[in-house]
């Protein structure tokens, strides 16, 4: 399974520290994934609420992980 992510969904949650913008984007995605896995919410992001006709399209086109 592949999923597209937008780091800007999470990058402001975490202090940038000494990371470059690209490093911070990667860190932010990984940190959010770790937290969502830890609190049990990650699975729900792989099963987003969609109308019945949208599931087939999402299987072909994909969706943005983190958007419910």
Image (spheres, grey):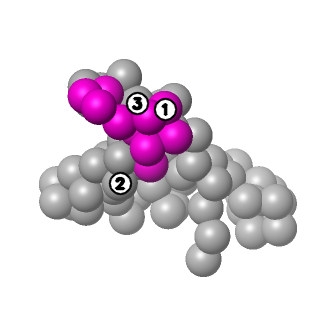
Residue 20 lies in the magenta-colored region: yes
Q: Crowding near pointer 3: few (<14 within 10 Å), some, many (20+)?
A: some
Q: Which residue is mark 1?
A: 21
Q: Which residues are magenta?
A: 16-26
Write the residue at 73% across / 59% down. 62
Residue that sits furthest to the bottom in the current view: 1
Q: Crowding near pointer 2: few (<14 within 10 Å), some, many (20+)?
A: some
The answer to which image quadrant residue 2 occupies is bottom right
Visible residue check, residue 67: no
Q: Which residue is mark 2?
A: 30
Write the residue at 45% across / 55% down. 45
Which is closer to the viewer, label 2 or label 1?
1
Tell me the quarter of the image containing the N terminus.
Answer: bottom right
Direction from residue 38 to residue 20 in the image, left or right = right
Residue 21 lies in the magenta-colored region: yes
How much space separates mark 2 and mark 1, taking CA atoms? 14 Å
Element carrying mark 3: helix
Q: Which residue is mark 3?
A: 11
């Amino acid at each position: 399974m592949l999923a597209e992510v937008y780091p800007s969904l999470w990058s402001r949650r975490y202090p940038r520290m000494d990371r470059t913008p690209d490093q911070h984007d990667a860190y932010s995605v990984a940190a959010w994934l770790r937290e969502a896995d830890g609190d049990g919410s990650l699975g729900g992001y792989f099963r987003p609420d969609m109308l019945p006709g949208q599931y087939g399209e999402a299987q072909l086109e994909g969706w943005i992980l983190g958007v419910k």
